[in-house]
Amino acid sequence: MKEKRGRVTRDGIRIHEPEDFAGMHKAGRLAAQLLDEVIPMVKPGVRTGELDAYITRRVEEEGAISATIGYRGYQHGSCISVNHVVCHGIPGDKRLKDGDILNIDITVIVDGWYGDTSRMYVAGRPSRKAERLMQVTHDALMKGIEAVKPGNTFGDIGHAIQAYVEAHRMSVVRDFCGHGLGRVFHAPPNVLHYGRPGTGPMLEEGMFFTIEPMVNLGGPETKVLADGWTAVTRDRSLSAQYEHSIGVTAEGAEIFTLSPAGKFHPTWEA
Ligand code: MF3
Ligand code: CO
Ligand code: CO
């Protein structure tokens, strides 16, 4: 879709208008609400395809559109990535087992605006190392968001994430990145989850993008399976991911995909 207003930077990054934040907020909020709704469904024995079917039905009920169905031939309303799957796991007939950790990633379109978010879930009880991985990944995302303010650079975001993750002796995946979004799903820039301070494009008020670090307990290397989508860790170590869609404000960042139920992190549940 052609956009009429606003401007684009030298790096091809769109600068949105103040009134555009409301559109992103609405889309982001629905995506986050649907991720809240599936929390009680995630249990040992459930099929990932059942979780996906619920999400797909609810997106329709809300009068929204799933951005992933039909995207480059992808056929599902969510990506569900279990254990050593890094991202783009395809929902299916496999049942969750006690202790499995999984990322559910959804993108909805509301009034033309895209809301893209993912978070971790646990079937039953996680191992200590899985719990630690999820905690570090979540906190790394928030460190990245803390680096967002006009005048900082995209390298500052990547550096904040990488430094935090590596201080915990885990690794940041290099093969996938965050992205600009707005009235489109994937736009410039590539938001790297590693980098050096002061490098990359300067952040400006009105930029909309995702931050979605993938963190591995082992090495950072990944490979894509024969289905063309499922990305796994090469060493089969556990992987976790959290994703928010955000907008740059005068003071910092507005997070569009905050959990309405305050349950963005599984270990927050009693
Ligand atoms: N939501 C993913 C992202 O964060 C993209 C999924 S594309 C799909 O960018 F086709 F795999 F669904
Ligand atoms: Co994304
Ligand atoms: Co996503």
Image (spheres, rainbow, N blue to C red):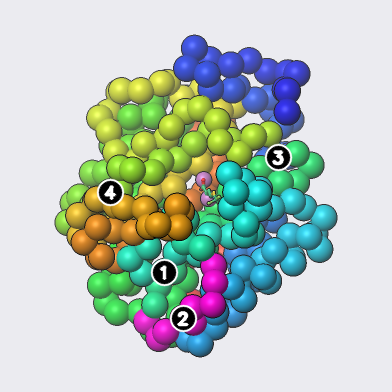
Q: Which mark is residue 172?
A: 4
- Circle 3: residue type: Trp
Q: Residues within 10 Å of mark 2 (few under 14, many from 20)?
A: many
Secondary element type, mark 1: strand
Q: Which residue is mark 1?
A: 82
| Badge 3 density bin: few <14, some 14–19, many ≥20, Cα 10 Å | many
Q: Disc 3 versus disc 1: distance between alpha carbons? A: 28 Å
* Distance between mark 4 and mark 2 Cα atoms: 25 Å
Q: Is mark 2 within 8 Å of ligand 1?
A: no
Height in image: 174 above or below 38? above
2 and 1 marks in contact (CB < 8 Å): yes
Q: Nearer the viewer, residue 161 or 180?
A: 180
Q: Is residue 124 above or below residue 269?
A: below
Estimate how packed mark 1 is, as few (under 14), some (14 to 19) or many (20 or more) residues with alpha carbons within 10 Å. Answer: many
* Earlier sequence position, callout 3 versus callout 1: 1
Q: Which residue is mark 3?
A: 113
- Residue at label 2? 96
The kind of residue on which mark 1 rests is Val
- Residue at 46% across / 81% down in the picture? 96
